[in-house]
Amino acid sequence: MTRRNATLYLATLVWVVLTMGIAQAQTPDPVTNAAAGFRTSHLVIDPALASFMSKGDAQALDGELAHATTPIMVAILPDSAVSGTVNSIGAEQTVYRLANLAAIPGTVGMILPQSGFFRATSSIIKPCPFGTPGCTPPGSPSGTIDGLAMAAAEAHGKQGLRSTVESFITAVQRAATAQAARANPTGTKPAPALPAPLGLILLGLAIIGGAGVWIFGRHRRQVLHAQKARELAGEHEVHDSIERSEV
């Protein structure tokens, strides 16, 4: 190989490496895009999977998620969102990554319709003991919510994505209600906490009011004591006058 050919070969190799790096940098990450999408929508569908759900169903589902009694977000992503082998473990790791990137308190679900996986995790709904009404026992590192996602996919997967997500929404809301009932078994509503400034103002008024009552009471006792003293003094004067007149 001549020096010129070697230089040309090296230049070509560098160009290929740079081109591959630029292409990889420009390739959108479905998980990162979905996490950003959760800031404006409760349902995120990757553009590559737009044909998997009609616009009407997507709008309806987004509304149902937005009005759920507990925060729920669902992303429908391609298998390429999973780095590595597309299997149950890979899907579970990906939904964890999605939830961490979103950093929004609530329940995050991820559906991979191409491979049929539906996994989920939650930062607010925790696993519950076996047999607890409204939720399932921990069956994986994700716990209760992951079990609800897999159950929804198994029961409604053949009916389509909308039916599957709606089943998941219902199950998650029940789990949230059950968790709230366990935390407050008596059903009593806690007294609302007063804002700090208002609480301090009320405390100050209470102290001032108490001091005022004490001062008023003290003054009243002094007045009554003085009045009684005057009455006694008057009685003594009358008595002395009577004695002098008798003499």
Image (tube, rainbow, N blue to C red):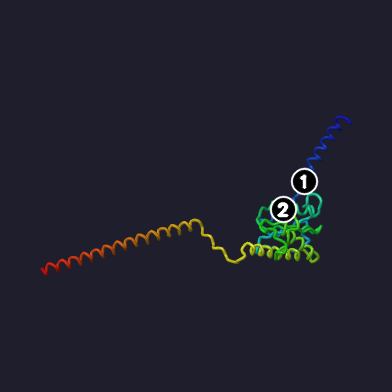
Mark nearest the camera among 2 and 1 is: 2
Outermost residue toward the top in this view? 3
The residue tagged with tag 1: helix, strand or loop? helix
Residue furthest front in the image? 247
Which of pointers 2 and 1 lies earlier in the amino acid sequence?
1
Q: Left or right of 188: which side holds 66?
A: right
CA–CA distance in space, label 2 to label 1: 20 Å
Which quadrant is home to the N terminus?
top right
Amino acid at dot 1: Gln
Q: Looking at the rendering, which quadrant does residue 217 occupy?
A: bottom left
Residue 150, percent from left and from top: 77, 60
Q: Can you tell which quarter of the image residue 92 is in? A: bottom right
At horizontal 81% and vertical 51% (from top left) the residue drawn is 85
Tag 2: Cα neighbours inside 10 Å, few (<14), some, or many (≥20)? Answer: many
Looking at this view, is 83 or 18 the one in front? 83
Residue sitting at the far right: 1
Seen at 47% across and 56% down, the residue is: 200
Q: Which mark is residue 24?
A: 1
Local SS, label 2: helix
Residue 166 location (% of width, % of height): 73, 65
Q: Dot 1 surroundings within 10 Å: few (below 14), some, or many (20 or more)?
A: few
Quarter holding the C terminus? bottom left
Callout 2–callout 1 Cβ contact below 8 Å: no
Q: Amino acid at mark 2?
A: Leu
The residue located at (50%, 56%) in the rendering is 196
Q: Position of residue 8 (x, y in %)?
A: 84, 34
Q: 54 or 241, which lies in front?
A: 241
Query: Looking at the rendered structure, which numbered label has been put on residue 98?
Result: 2
Residue 105 in sight: yes
For this view, does 187 lie left or right of residue 214? right
